[in-house]
């Protein structure tokens, strides 16, 4: 075919008019959020709302009172909120910058015929009606009808089918697919949003991204905390006004602010963000780009991995598995000569045949040099074979490769032999192979052939996949394969990589199933084949409606809708399409399936650390709430007053902020560095599991209450010894600070035995040193609203702190030994636990 003789193509004027009418040949760009909206999005949390309310009330009271002094409480709360929001925005921008380097798969230029001549133009300027030239190696720039020739097209990015598909005159080629053999013209029918890529983009626009398990748990937990804080604050405001009168409303509101500050762990959002960021950095060292912080933790909650086959489980590269032939040398000779590949370029099957021949010691170049080609019949979907006629020393010989059944019909093999070869070919196909026949004949002929045998082709699993799947299954995570490939191929690959179960459903099966029937089937089916994008989304939604937390892996355009709908979407960075990467939560820069399981382990470890510092933080927050509320009530009953005449506040807002930040922050951050080998020895937590389990709630309640009772005892006993109320409040304040630092040790004892953490020791030592300095220096003491401490008072603080620490350790160790502790039901430790911290 002469590519220049098909048509003159559009005129430049027509093309400009159509470009104005249809728009550019590009997907609609995702609207980038302005900086202020990115920042505002970081404040969507009930805990943040409580802090914002406390900030507003504190500023209002300060302004109403005449703006005397400096609003330290307001400044501290504002700094915390901005720090947390800035960390979230920074991580999002960092992920986007990394992904910007991956946008290399689009076809920026294409050969288009305009005004009777070929022009190399930007693919974005292609319009419906254009004539485009495509050839081997080109990515199809727009949807169009093939004109005048046959080509082989790799459609795995759309369908998941790893074997190239033959397309002939009049067939539709979809944008994004790759021509692997042949050269032809394409009459463009659809561009931009109307193309195959555009329709997928539209489908993505109608899919809502799910919140991660951590986000759902934090939201529920935050709602509960916010409700209780609001109820308690309102009750205390009413009680305060009743006791002190309306004239003291400002003082009462400040008391409510102190209570809110005591109840809310101000450092929690920032510490959680930093913890997740540390996980992101660890994943980055493993060649994974995290686009959403919470996605790392969400992977730790995953109960099902729904994985694509082509390019994810397999290499997406054809290989020769073996050759079944009575004359192996002749069979390989036929594979070399009936071959149009050059080095590593050409049809993937031809490339794989040459690669295998070289591995077998065949001098491919020498064979081609000694057997010059006389003529050839290219592969065609009609006759289903290729013939190459060459000149050998003994004469002219034809070598053929193609469908075994076709070559057998053209061979001299008898009926029994044909049946035996056919049975072999069918058996190999059921095992997941693409089977080629090879033959030869004297002269330039296609019949009376000598059948040389079968060549077994396959797209092999990636080497690390079987071990990764085993680790996932050991951790209680189901693995489901969803592919567009043939059912027998999918079933065979599943067996080879260790995915359990033999039953396979197709996309047509899914279409015909009711919602209940599909949900029932998903309890046992682990392989889905011939699946289209809408089928994959329905499978994901059915799993989620059954309470599963689903991670979806994939690299193709066909995977993008499911990646967005999943709880965690994991895209391949090297082979992955732009659309898939843009909607995924996690992008694997090396396409290594093992990184997915490593991410699950990272997520579980992060969740364990989050639980540790929530136990640690809330044990003190509970003690602060009890001290503030019960202490204020007792002060009102006993007539204890400030110098201004108002009821004594056991702790001021500034002191509470200091406890929650200065003594909580560093230890909580150090807990984020805890290593948790063994987290993969138990099943994932149920999606409905609370953020704090029963053992954690019991630890918070018992240890927090005990510490509060000691602090209240200090407030009551020290004045009886002849010291001032300010001294009593100061000693109680320092006790709560140092006692909280010690509580980091029992707080980290969950179902896993704690590993050594030097950073935690350093944080606690540093915190105690800072506390002693702040309590001893007069200027620092005045800033905190305390009086300078003497060494006998410090001795009292240390003794009380050590006593409460010992009590908390006893509670923690007792719970660790209880029958309900998950450590007793976890699988035994494995040798590789410490290799995957």
Image: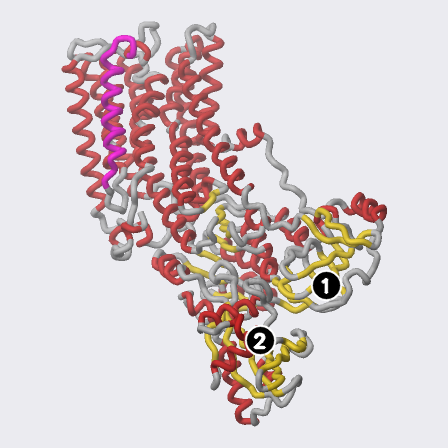
Question: Residues at badges 2 and 1 in contact (C-beta under 8 Å)?
Answer: no
Q: Main secondary structure of the magenta part?
A: helix
Residue 59 at x, y = what percent? 47, 15
Q: Is residue 492 left or right of residue 723?
A: right
The residue segment tinted magenta is 756-780
Label ID, residue 73: none
> Quick check: is 764 in the magenta stretch?
yes
Determine the image quadrant of residue 702: top left
Task: Find disc 2 in the rendering and name its residue.
Answer: 337
Q: Residue at x 29, y 15 (%)?
A: 635
Residue 184's label in the rendered image is 1
Q: Nearer the viewer, mark 2 or mark 1?
A: 2
Crowdedness of circle 1 by 10 Å Cα count: few (<14), some, many (20+)? many
How packed is label 2: few (under 14 Cα within 10 Å), some, or many (20 or more)? many
Quadrant holding the N terminus: bottom right
> Residue at point 44% right, 29% down?
84
Q: Secondary structure at mark 1?
A: strand
x and y, in percent, of residue 580 in the image: 56, 50
Q: Earlier in the sequence, mark 2 or mark 1?
A: 1
> Left or right: 754 with respect to 124?
left
Q: Nearer the viewer, residue 572 or 148?
A: 148
Of 151 and 206, the residue lying toward us: 151
- Is residue 534 inside the magenta stretch? no
Where residue 351 appears, as percent x and y from the top left, is 55, 67
Q: Secondary structure at mark 2?
A: helix
- As drawn, 313 above or below 732: below
> Looking at the rendering, which quadrant does residue 379 occupy?
bottom right
Q: Looking at the image, which is closer to me, 567 or 560?
A: 560
Q: Position of residue 491 (x, y in %)?
A: 48, 70
């Amino acid at each position: 075919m002469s590519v220049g003789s098909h048509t003159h193509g559009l005129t430049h004027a027509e093309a400009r008019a159509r470009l104005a009418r249809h728009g550019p040949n590009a997907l609609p760009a995702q609207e980038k959020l302005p900086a202020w909206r990115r920042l505002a999005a970081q404040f969507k949390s009930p805990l943040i709302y409580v802090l914002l309310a406390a900030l507003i009330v504190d500023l209002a009271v300060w302004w109403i009172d005449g703006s005397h002094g400096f609003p330290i409480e307001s400044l501290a709360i504002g700094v915390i909120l901005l720090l947390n929001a800035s960390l979230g925005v920074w991580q999002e921008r960092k992920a986007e910058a990394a992904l910007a380097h991956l946008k290399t798969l689009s076809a920026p230029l294409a050969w288009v015929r305009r005004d009777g001549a070929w022009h190399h133009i930007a693919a974005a300027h292609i319009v419906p009606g254009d004539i485009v030239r495509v050839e081997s190696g080109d990515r199809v720039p727009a949807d169009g009808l093939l004109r005048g020739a046959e080509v082989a097209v790799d459609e795995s990015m759309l369908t998941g089918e790893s074997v190239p598909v033959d397309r002939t005159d009049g067939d539709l080629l979809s944008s994004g697919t790759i021509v692997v053999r042949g050269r032809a013209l394409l009459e463009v029918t659809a561009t931009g949003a109307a193309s195959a890529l555009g329709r997928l983009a539209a489908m993505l626009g109608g899919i809502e991204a799910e919140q991660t398990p951590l986000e759902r748990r934090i939201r529920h937990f935050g709602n509960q905390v916010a409700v209780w804080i609001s109820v308690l604050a309102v009750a205390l405001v009413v009680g305060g006004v009743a006791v002190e009168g309306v004239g003291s409303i400002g003082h009462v509101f400040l008391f409510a602010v102190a209570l809110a500050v005591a109840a809310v762990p101000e450092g929690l959002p920032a510490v959680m963000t930093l913890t997740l960021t540390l996980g992101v950095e660890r994943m980055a060292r493993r060649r994974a780009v995290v686009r959403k912080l919470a996605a790392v933790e969400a992977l730790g909650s995953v109960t099902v991995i729904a994985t694509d086959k082509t390019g994810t489980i397999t290499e997406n590269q054809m290989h020769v598995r073996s050759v079944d032939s009575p004359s192996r040398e002749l069979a390989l000779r036929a594979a070399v000569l009936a071959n149009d590949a050059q080095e590593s370029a050409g049809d993937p099957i031809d490339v794989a045949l040459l690669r295998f021949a070289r591995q077998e010691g065949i001098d491919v170049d020498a064979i081609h040099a000694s057997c010059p080609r006389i003529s050839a019949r290219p592969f065609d979907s009609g006759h289903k074979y290729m013939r190459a006629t060459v000149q050998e020393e003994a004469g002219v010989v034809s070598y053929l490769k193609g469908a075994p059944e076709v070559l057998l019909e053209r061979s001299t093999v008898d009926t029994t032999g044909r049946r035996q070869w056919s049975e072999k070919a069918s058996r190999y196909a059921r095992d997941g192979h693409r089977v080629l026949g090879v033959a030869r004949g004297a002269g330039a002929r296609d019949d009376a052939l000598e059948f040389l045998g079968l060549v077994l082709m396959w797209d092999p699993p990636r080497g690390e996949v079987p071990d990764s799947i085993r680790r996932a299954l050991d951790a209680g995570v189901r693995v489901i394969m969803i592919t567009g490939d043939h059912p027998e191929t999918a079933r065979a690959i599943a067996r080879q990589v260790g995915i359990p179960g033999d039953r396979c459903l197709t996309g047509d099966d899914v279409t015909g199933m009711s919602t209940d029937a599909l949900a029932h089937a998903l309890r046992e089916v682990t392989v889905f084949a011939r699946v289209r994008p809408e089928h994959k989304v329905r499978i994901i939604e059915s799993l989620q409606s059954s309470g599963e937390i689903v991670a979806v892996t994939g690299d193709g355009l066909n995977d993008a809708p499911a990646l967005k709908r999943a709880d965690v979407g994991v895209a391949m960075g090297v082979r992955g399409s732009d659309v898939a990467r843009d909607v995924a939560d996690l992008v694997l820069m090396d396409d290594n399936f093992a990184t997915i399981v490593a991410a699950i382990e990272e997520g579980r470890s992060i969740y364990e650390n989050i639980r540790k510092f929530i136990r640690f933080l809330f044990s003190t927050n509970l003690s602060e709430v009890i001290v503030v509320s019960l202490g204020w009530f007792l002060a009102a009953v006993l007539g204890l007053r400030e110098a201004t005449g108002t009821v004594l506040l056991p702790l001021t807002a500034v002191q509470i902020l200091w406890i929650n930040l200065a003594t909580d922050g560093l230890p909580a951050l150090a807990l984020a560095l805890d290593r948790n080998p063994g987290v993969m020895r138990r099943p994932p937590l149920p999606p409905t599991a609370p953020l704090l389990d029963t053992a954690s709630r019991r630890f918070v309640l018992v240890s927090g209450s005990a510490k509060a009772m000691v602090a209240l005892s200090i407030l009551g006993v020290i004045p009886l010894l002849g010291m001032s109320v300010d001294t009593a409040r100061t000693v109680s304040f320092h006790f709560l600070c140092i006692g909280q630092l010690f509580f980091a040790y029992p707080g980290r004892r969950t179902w896993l035995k704690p590993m050594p953490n030097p950073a935690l020791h350093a944080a606690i030592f540093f915190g105690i040193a800072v506390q002693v300095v702040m309590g001893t220096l007069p200027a620092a003491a005045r800033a905190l609203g305390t009086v300078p401490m003497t060494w006998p008072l410090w001795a009292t603080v240390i003794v009380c702190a050590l006593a409460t620490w010992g009590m908390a350790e006893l509670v923690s160790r007792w719970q660790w030994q209880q029958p309900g502790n998950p450590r007793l039901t976890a699988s035994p430790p494995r040798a590789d636990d410490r290799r995957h911290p």
